[in-house]
Amino acid sequence: MKEAKNSRKSNSGEKIRINRFLARAGIASRREAETLIEEGRVYLNGERVDSFAVLVDPNKDFVEVDGERAKLPKRYSYFLFYKPKEVVSTMDDPEGRVSISKFIPKGTKGLFPVGRLDYHSEGLLLITNDGELSARLLHPRYKVVKTYELKVKGNPSEEKLNKLRRGIFLDGKKTLPVEIKRIFRRETNHTWLEVKMKEGRKNQLREMFFRIEHPVIKLKRTAIGPIRIGKMKAGEIRELKKEEVEELMSVCGINLQGGLK
């Protein structure tokens, strides 16, 4: 496969902190990387890392996590995928169900999905080998908006929707405020809604609407930040344009230092 037009080199030759290196390698988020270091699971050139301030030269140093080498890809790649229903959001599945790897172009390596959509949901899924971008897109700290279209059972009152808008407690933690707008479609006994949210716990939307007794019947993610699924059809995949990657980087606060090449 030809090199993606939107790819960017990952090895600048400059030294970076160990936690950022692990994030960019797709091993863990920066905070999770700090936990790995605290647990003594990270080694640099054969020596156990015991400080978050340790610097790594991606072109020269040898980093290991749990005995496995961690390294940056030579180039980062970015894909937009319309995940169909009844496809798992992983590269493989022990139960033998269809996974997203079936749809990824041949010749690409080291890719992983940015977050997940549950088995029965559909819509936009970003796939990349850029660990730092993935972590930032998913972390509520960066407030990247994810947009969904839902069909729910019945006709929820504004009182119930306002409850979700303000936030409810799930597993002992209150959800962040969300935006909810009605989508006017002729549907008997069901309601269509657009929901915008800045976090994404496992099955969060389904659980939220179950709590107000209007369970989700259909769920489709239509956008992540500035990236929209548009007129793509289920099962289609394409590379992100250079401008789209730059927009994603911008909303996540990643400095491109001159843009993509």
Image (spheres, rainbow, N blue to C red):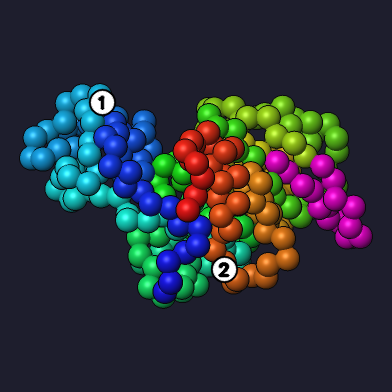
Magenta highlight: main SS: strand
Q: Are marks 2 and 1 in contact (CB under 8 Å)?
A: no
- Residue 118 appears in which quarter of the rendering? bottom right
- Which amino acid does the dot numbered 1 rest on? Phe
Q: Residue 65, position in %: x, y? A: 20, 44
Q: Residue 222, position in %: x, y? A: 68, 54
Residue at 46% over, 44% down: 133
Q: In the rendered view, does 240 fall on the left or right side of 26?
A: right
Q: In the rendered view, does 103 fall on the left or right side of 44?
A: right
The residue labelled by disc 2 is 237
Residue nearer the viewer, 59 or 24:
59
Q: Which mark is residue 92?
A: none
| Mark 1 Cα-neighbour bin, 10 Å: few <14, some 14–19, many ≥20 | some
Q: Which mark is residue 52?
A: 1
Residue nearer the viewer, 250 or 119:
250
Magenta residues? 181-196
Spatial distance from mark 2 to mark 1, Cα to Cα? Answer: 38 Å
- The answer to whether residue 51 is seen in the rendering is yes
Q: In the rendered view, does 225 fall on the left or right side of 40?
A: right
- The answer to whether residue 121 is seen in the rendering is no
Q: In the rendered view, does 105 fall on the left or right side of 199?
A: left
Quadrant of the rendering where the N terminus is positioned: bottom left
Residue nearer the viewer, 213 or 95:
95
- Which amino acid does the dot numbered 2 rest on? Ile
> Is 246 a magenta residue?
no
| Mark 2 Cα-neighbour bin, 10 Å: few <14, some 14–19, many ≥20 | many
How many marks on residues? 2
Residue at 73% over, 39% down: 212
